[in-house]
Image (cartoon, rainbow, N blue to C red):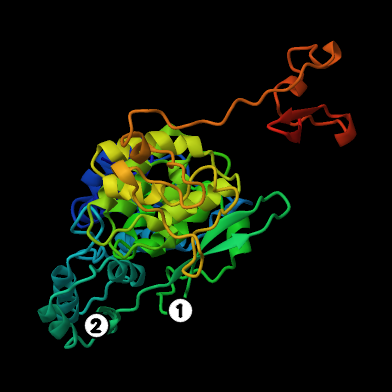
Amino acid sequence: MTATVLRRGDDDPVRHELLLDGLRWAARGDRAAAARVLGPVMPQWPGPWADLIAAVTGLPAPPRYDDPYAHRYVTPFGVLIQRRSTELAARLAADPPPALLATPATVAGHVDPGRVLGLLQQAERDGWQPGHTDLAQALLRLPRSVDAAVHAAADRLTSPAGRRFADRLADGTEPRTWIEDVPDQPYYPGRRIAMLDPAGLPAEVADPRTAAQRVTGASHLPGLALWPMVAPSHREVTAAHIQPHLLVAYGSPGTAFLEGLAAADGPPGPAMSLILAYTLASRRQDVRLASADALVTLAARPDWDSTLVGAELGVAAGADRIVLQRTVQPLTEAFKAGARDAVGRRSRRRCRRCWPRSPGPASPTSSRSPPTPAAGGRWTCPTCGRSPPGPAAATSSSRPAASPPPRTVPDRPRRHRQGRHDRRVTGRRTHGLARSQRWPGCVGGATIWL
């Protein structure tokens, strides 16, 4: 398993946790045998896995070097994961703990509250204390509902770690998330960013930065797959941390984080809706299909609502931030997989022709109400009366949706048609020419500049 992680990358949170617990077992056993097994797979580059293997085997770790771009990768979730590895490496080299409190009991990342309670009681009896970061991670992985017997037993704990555990069980604060529009900045186009209220959140996952700072601090991070398991009971918190990093133009965010977010618990909110809207229109097909799988998983939950996703698709399409045609394939696959209601809710929010004119979602006081099904079960736009694009409209009628007439231009002099790469005959904007020099074409009585 160690060789698999080091060769393929740390992109599986379940394998990540199994490897951490396995290294703890090796440190409490025969270290010489562990050195013979782990020595050949010791990484040749510095990092957390090299430090952990060196702590277990006693072999020298690769030397570290100063990275001038390390500040770009400083994020609350990334710092928590790094601190947990550093803390565990120090404990493995000195006195390995009997167990790790944060080892999850489910593939979603939740810990067993009864197991955590038993370990804390054992620590009080035997006189040892769990690691600070290990305890913080275990508290973030507590399920949303805990048995009353665990609450009663936690109140009787007297150690500092036990009191933190009891206080966390009694805290039912639900974090607040919202969306902010960030205008254009130098080297950064305007974007919509999911924000998180740090009030009431543990310091390990709070992010006090402004929306503009989160835009400039976003970068391509290869470890996004591990983030959903940091706080599996608060999907919106994790989604708010992940969303700015999905807007980076280079690299690929992967698809594992979508599976983790879909498996997490928590009420629906704007942060997760914004992630689904952008991943459904991603330029990468694997990300689009993974987003469809996440939608199918979420649609099976009784408390999920896709209305916000449809509103975010409308806003992004109206601002020309996504290619709407890319959403057809993933929505069709989700529709075929059974997420009919989820696809219908998002596809009937706005007609494609009306999005540029009214990009925002309908407000409670607006005269435009959500569309209602017409005769034959065909959804219509409240503004223009047309059926919206997508599988919900395609399956309700055998005829294809009406398309606008082709854009035609009048005949023009030959000098405007010479050259294969002359953009003036394609209907696209011609760069490098003054407006008075561009050739006007008349379509439907309206003059357009090509």
Camera-side residue of 402 and 111: 402
- At label 1, counting other C-alpha atoms closer than 10 Å, the crowd grade (few under 14, some 14-19, many 20 or more) is few
Residue 374: percent from the left, percent from the top?
34, 47
Q: Position of residue 271 (x, y in %)?
A: 44, 60
Residue 390 location (% of width, % of height): 40, 38
Q: Nearer the viewer, mark 1 or mark 2?
A: 1
Judging depth in this view, the residue of 12 and 318 nearest the camera is: 318
Q: Quadrant of residue 182?
A: bottom right
Of callouts 1 and 2, which one flags the residue occurring earlier in the amino acid sequence?
A: 2
Q: Which residue is mark 2?
A: 166
Answer left or right for 177 relative to 16.
right
Q: Residue drawn at (29%, 84%), measured in percent from left and top?
A: 160
- Dividing the picture into quadrants, the one containing residue 443 is top right
Look at the picture and state if 130 lies above or below 37.
below
Q: Is residue 263 at all visible to an observer of this figure?
A: yes
- Residue 399 picture location, percent across and down: 37, 28
Which quarter of the figure is the C terminus placed in?
top right
Secondary structure at numbered mark 2: helix
Q: CA distance from mark 1 to mark 2?
A: 20 Å
Mark 2 Cα shell of 10 Å, populated few (<14), some (14-19), many (≥20) = many
Q: Tell me the amino acid under the disc marked 1.
A: Ala
User: Relative to 419, is 315 on the left or the right?
Assistant: left
